[in-house]
Amino acid sequence: MSEKVNCLIIGSGPAGYTAAIYAARANMNPVLYQGIQPGGQLTTTTDVENFPGYPKGISGPEMMIELQSQAERFGTDIRNGWITNVDFRNELKLWVNNEHELECNTVIISTGASAKYLGLKSEKKYLELGGGVSACAVCDGFFYKNQEVVIVGGGDSACEEAHYLSKLCSKVTMLVRKSQFRASKIMQDRVIKTANIEILYNTSTVEVKGDGQLVTSILIKNNLNNKLREIPATGFFVAIGHKPNTDIFKPYINMDSTGYIINEQGSTKTNIKGVFVSGDAADHTYRQAITAAGTGCMAALDAERYLASM
Ligand SMILES: Cc1cc2nc3c(=O)[nH]c(=O)nc-3n(C[C@H](O)[C@H](O)[C@H](O)COP(=O)(O)OP(=O)(O)OC[C@H]3O[C@@H](n4cnc5c(N)ncnc54)[C@H](O)[C@@H]3O)c2cc1C
């Protein structure tokens, strides 16, 4: 027997919890599954200083606990569990942990995206310590004002983030693995022409070095002659892409080549009636907590209107 759900929200990041606040206050009886990362990406960061309403800043995990309690206050049914399968052929059917079947009137996908990292032990160490490794220049660049930083990546996002950092930091060293950028010509030109960005082609990261708490330098290798060199830096930014958590929806939902869900312009509607998308799962451009929350609100309002028209 499947459980009937009026409004299913998948994911517990800023998009999912905001959708839940709106859906619960509209008497839509939302059920939210948190997935394996309750609270989403912000639980992996220390200070969040750019979310409106926190003039002194707040830690990522604390902010997500507050969002969860706000969603619970209005009656959202928040559950542990991972949506493992979907079948959108006729009804909206989904399975939790491969066993519990749900039949839904509406579904809000808020499954976010995961930043890609290089996979170095030292990178993981300083990322977890909040000591100077980041995958988001817009989020964390400000903490490195007037300091020297290193950024890894050769695509458009890496160029954009390097340029963003160059306006805050005294020096930005950009490590490009190959002999040329992957980025578009216009983005390449922007970084090449910026005085305080140094570009090192054919260069890989060997180790993120630090004092046990904070990053102090980056050990790099020239891929052509294997020569090692250490660059002083207090920040290490990784800009090698994101992976949207959308694989399970692939057979039914329209996506771009990297897996970002394509929504109808100006709304959160997907190509399947009753299925809406919010947050980073559909956003490769802004990728911020506030934009995720904004589209979470939109998805709940779109779902409410859809239910009213059923
Ligand atoms: C290190 C770091 C620092 C950041 N700092 C800032 C900052 O200072 N300010 C800012 O605005 N933004 C910041 N960001 C970006 C911000 O975290 C994201 O833009 C935001 O979290 C996206 O929200 P979301 O709700 O779309 O998804 P996410 O936060 O990615 O949450 C996705 C949720 O979906 C769940 N999920 C996924 N698949 C399933 C499934 N199959 N079943 C059930 N649940 C599932 C996960 O468990 C998770 O709860 C930072 C990001 C990182 C990585």
Image: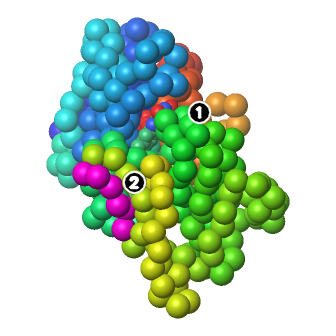
Whichever of labels 2 and 1 marks the residue nearer the N terminus, that label is 2
Q: Which residue is mark 1?
A: 268
Q: Quadrant of ligand 1?
A: top left
Q: Residue pushed farthest bottom? A: 225
Image position, residue 6 (x, y; %): 36, 24
The secondary structure making up most of the magenta span is strand
Residue found 28% across the figure and 64% down from its top: 121
Image disc number at residue 2: none
Quick one: 109 or 290, which is closer to the camera?
Answer: 290
Q: Is residue 212 above or below residue 52?
A: below
- When asked about the image quadrant of residue 11, the answer is top left
Instruction: Classify residue 176 as left or right of residue 251.
Output: right
Disc 2: CA contacts within 10 A as few (<14), some (14-19) or many (>=20): many
Q: Is residue 180 above or below residue 161?
A: below
Image position, residue 156 (x, y; %): 68, 59
- Of badges 2 and 1, the one in the foreground is 2
Quick one: 102 or 21, which is closer to the camera?
Answer: 21
Q: Amino acid at mark 2?
A: Thr
Image position, residue 231 (x, y; %): 49, 64
Pointer 1 residue Cβ closer than 8 Å to ligand 1? no
| Quadrant occupied by the N terminus | top left
The part of the chain drawn in magenta is: 207-212
Quick one: 300 or 287, which is closer to the camera?
Answer: 287
Residue found 48% across the figure and 58% down from its top: 232
Q: Amino acid at mark 1?
A: Thr
Quick one: 39 or 158, which is closer to the camera?
Answer: 158
Question: Which structural element holds mark 2?
Answer: strand
Regarding residue 23, the answer to whether it shows in the image is no
Q: Which residue is mark 2?
A: 216
